[in-house]
Amino acid sequence: MIKNSFLRTLRRSHTMSASLKTNFLGFDYENPFMNASGVHCMSTAELDELANSKAGAFITKSSTPADRAGNPSPRYISVPLGSINSMGLPNKGIDYYLEYVLDRQAKYPDAVPIFFSVAGMSVQDNLDMLHKIQDSAFNGVTELNLSCPNVPGKPQVAYDFDLTVEILTKVFAFFKKPLGVKLPPYFDFAHFEIMSNILNKFPLTYVNSINSVGNGLYIDVEKESVVIKPKDGFGGIGGEYVKPTALANVRAFYTRLNPSIKIIGTGGIRNGQDAFEHLLCGATMLQIGTELQKEGPSIFARITEELKQIMDKKGYKTIDEFRGKLQSI
C-alpha cells in the first residue's frame, strides 16, 4: 500500500510538470498557440481580446497599403468539417495595424514580440509595406503572405517559383528585421524540393504552412446553390478537411529547410491532439483559424489544457522532447 501510494504521488507530481513554453527567436512564449491572420484580428478590440486570451502570441490582420472592404457577402461559411471563404483581404490598412503594434510595444516593453502580417495586392504593394515596417520602430516578427493571388490570370505567388525568388531577393536587399512567409499547400514532392531549395537561400525566420486549400466548392443541396457569393462559389477550404495536407506540408518543410528556419503549423487544429500532431511533424508555433472563428478566443484556454493532458499521459515535460520526432515504419 505504501509503495502504491508513493507511485501515485510520483505520477501526480509528474502530471503537473508539463510545460508548453516555446522558444522562438530567443523569446519564451507561454505556449505555441496563436491566431491565423484573418481570424479575430480585424479591429484593435479583437486584437486586444487575443492579447488577453491564453494564446501564447497573436498576429495582426493581413494588411494592404490602404483599407479594403473585401469581397461581397456571404464570403465565409462554416460547414460540417471546416469552412469555405473568399474574403478578398478586408482590412483597415497597414497604418491602422502599425499604429496599434507600436502603441502596444510602448505600453508593454517586456512583452513577447507581436507578429505582423502583410499581403499586398501586388509585388510593389508588399515592397512598399515592408519598407514602412523596416523604417518603423516595430520590433516584432513580420509575416509576408505569398499565398494570395497578386496578378490577374497568374497563380498564387508561391506557386510561381521564379516570382518567389524575385520577390525574396528584392525584400532581403533592404529588410533586416525577422521575416517569415506564409505558403499555400503543395501536393507534389517535386514542389517541396523546389520551394525548399529556394527558401534555404534566404535568411527567413520561419515558414507558415498552410494557407487554405484554394478553390474548393461547397454546395447547399436544398437550395441547389453554392454557399458563398464571390468567384461563383469557389473559395479556400479550411478546418478538419485540410489537416492531413497541412501535416504533410509541415513535415515536408521541417525535413528539408535549414534548421534556422522554423515552421508555423496551420490547418485543421481543433483540439490538443491536432496540435500534438503538428508539433510531432516539426512545427514550433501553431496558428488556429477555422476553429477560432467558430469558438472565439476561449479556444486557447481549452486547447492548451488538452495538449498538456496529452503530454502528461505520454510523460513529456516539454514540447522539445517530441517536436519533429515523427517516426516512420
Image (cartoon, rainbow, N blue to C red):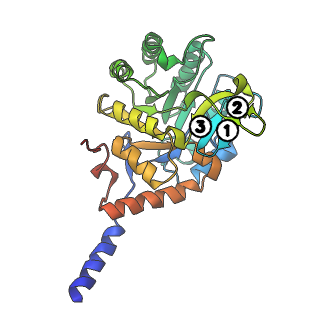
Q: Which residue is mark 3?
A: 60
Q: Which residue is mark 2?
A: 92
Q: Residue furthest bottom?
A: 1
Q: Residues within 10 Å of mark 3 (few under 14, many from 20)?
A: many
Residue 99 place in picture, x, y as percent? 64, 35
Secondary structure at badge 1 equals loop
Instruction: Estimate the spatial distance between the alpha carbons at disc 2 and disc 3, rounded to whole Å.
Output: 11 Å
Residue 223 place in picture, x, y as percent? 78, 36
Q: Quadrant of the C terminus?
A: top left
Q: Residue at x 57, y 38 (%)?
A: 238
Q: Residue at x 34, y 65 (%)?
A: 17
Secondary structure at badge 2 equals loop
> Which labelled disc corresponds to residue 98?
none
Amino acid beneath label 2:
Lys
Instruction: Estimate the spatial distance between the alpha carbons at disc 2 and disc 1, rounded to whole Å.
Output: 7 Å
The answer to whether 24 appears left or right of 90 in the picture is left
Q: Earlier in the sequence, mark 2 or mark 1?
A: 1
Amino acid beneath label 3:
Thr
Q: Residues within 10 Å of mark 1 (few under 14, many from 20)?
A: some
Secondary structure at badge 3 equals loop
239 or 56, which lies in front?
A: 239
Q: Residue at x 46, y 43 (%)?
A: 286
Q: Earlier in the sequence, mark 3 or mark 1?
A: 1
Q: Which residue is mark 1?
A: 42
Tell me if residue 18 can be seen.
no
Q: Residue furthest left?
A: 3
Q: Earlier in the sequence, mark 2 or mark 3?
A: 3
Q: Quadrant of the N terminus?
A: bottom left
